[in-house]
Structure formats: C-alpha cells, structure tokens
Amino acid sequence: MSKRIESKSCQANTNGKKCDKDPIANCFHCSYNLCLKHLTEHTQLVESQSQTFFESNGTILNDFSKKLSTLSISPRVLELPFLQLEKWRHDAHEKLDELAEQKRQEIHLKIAEYRAILTKQVSEQKHQIDKLKRYLNDLSRQTNLATKDIKSFENQLNETRQFLTNVEKHSIQLSIEDFSVHIQTHYFETNISQPIQRTDSIRSARSEKKESPVSNGLKRRFIKKRSLSVCLL
C-alpha cells in the first residue's frame, strides 16, 4: 500500500488542519505522502471501506441469487398481452359498430341520390319513347321510307336500349380492407451478439434491431418494451 519517500511534510489534511510532521511513506491508494500517524489512520480507513464494499456487494449477490432461484414469468408476459388484446377487441367492436352505422347512413343518402337521378332519367326516356312512337306512326303512313329516316329512328331506339342495359349494371359497392394486428416481441439476448428477436404477425410486422450496450467488458441483458399496433380502417 505504501512506499518510503522523502518529502517536506505530511500531506494529510484533517478538518482544514495540515500536519507538519515528516512523511514516512507514499500511499498508493491516494498518492499522498503521509506520516506514521496519518498513514495508520488512512490504512484503517481504507480497510474499513474495503470491508464495507465486500459485505454490501456480497449481500447484493446473495439477494440476486435468491431472486433468480424464485424467478417466474411476469404477469406482464403471461396476462398483460391478453388483457390488451381483449380491450382492443372490445374497442374495435365499438368502432366497427360506429363506422358501420355511419356508412349505413351514407349508403341511404347515396340510394336517395341515385333514385332521384334515375327517376329523372326514366322520365326523359319515357318522353323519348312517346316521341319515337309518334315518329314510327308518321313513318308508317309514308309510301316510300327514306334510309336516313330509318337510320335516325334506329339510332334513337338504340339510345334507349343502351340506357336500359346500363341501368342493369348500376350498383353501389363498398371498398373494404381487413384491419390488422401486429405483435412484436423482443426477448433478452443470451450472448454478446445481436439480441434474439422474434416477430409473429397476423398480417405483416416490421421490427428494428438494436445493439445491446457493453460496459467494462460485461454483457448487459435487457428487455425491450413490447408493442402492439392496431390499424383500424
């Protein structure tokens, strides 16, 4: 702990008072040149601190050993994700019911809008049919039918035929996509390499890898917080 050295005076400082005795050794612990009295006191202090260090850390290690012996899987692993999933399911049902009711009302509005347009178009087509009937009667009285008259009649007739064909194809459709649940689980690492990472996805899930911190050459195990993301259309 110490070595013999030569110095003007002891470097100990007790409550602001300097020692004027000649030093007999240099302490490797604090690099001070100390006299016999202060060297003895300092040695006792260092030994006391060392003993306290060993005892306190020995107690901590014993506590860790006991906890590891009784360690079990946390409810945050066994129960929490199911509670979160159930809450999400309940909330999702409520949101789906609200969304369905909103879209139901919107569909009724679209139907009313379409009915008004269709009624107007049908009325116009009926009026067109009446005109074609009169036109056909006029043509039937003629002795010689002109090609252009026949062509004009057929063109107007085709317009009504196309209208009826188009009406049969009219529809109101919904564009629907499934909602998805992404589950990302990050387990603690078991060696100095990258942390073990598993990703299970009902649709698709992306996860980011992070390197574990290393301090004083010791591996630190850590657990990243789990995340559950829900996308609801």
Image (cartoon, helix red, strand yellow):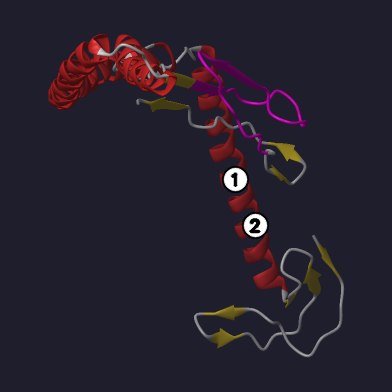
Does dot 2 land on a helix, a strand or a loop?
helix
Question: Of residues 179 and 207, which is closer to you in this image?
Answer: 179
User: What amino acid does circle 1 point to?
Assistant: Phe
Q: Residues within 10 Å of mark 2 (few under 14, many from 20)?
A: few
Q: Position of residue 16 (x, y in %)?
A: 52, 85
Instruction: Please state which of the two labelled residues, at mark 1 or mark 2, is closer to the viewer.
Output: 1
Question: Could you tell me what secondary structure mostly forms the magenta stretch?
Answer: loop
Q: Is residue 84 above or below residue 217?
A: above
Mark 2, residue position: 46
Which comes sooner in the sequence, label 1 or label 2? 2
CA gap between label 1 and label 2 equals 10 Å
- Residue 219: percent from left, percent from top: 71, 35
The x, y position of residue 187, in whole percent, is 59, 22
Task: Point out which mark residue 53 bears.
Answer: 1
Please check the rendered image and state whether residue 196 is part of the magenta-colored stretch, yes or no: yes
Q: Which residues are magenta?
A: 183-210
Residue 225 within the magenta-colored segment of the rendering:
no
Q: Secondary structure at mark 1?
A: helix
Q: Residue at x 65, y 52 (%)?
A: 47
Is residue 224 rendered to the left or right of residue 227? right
Image quarter of residue 221: top right
Q: Residues within 10 Å of mark 1 (few under 14, many from 20)?
A: few
Three-letter amino acid code at disc 2? Val
Image label count:
2
- Could you tell me which quadrant the C terminus lies in? top left
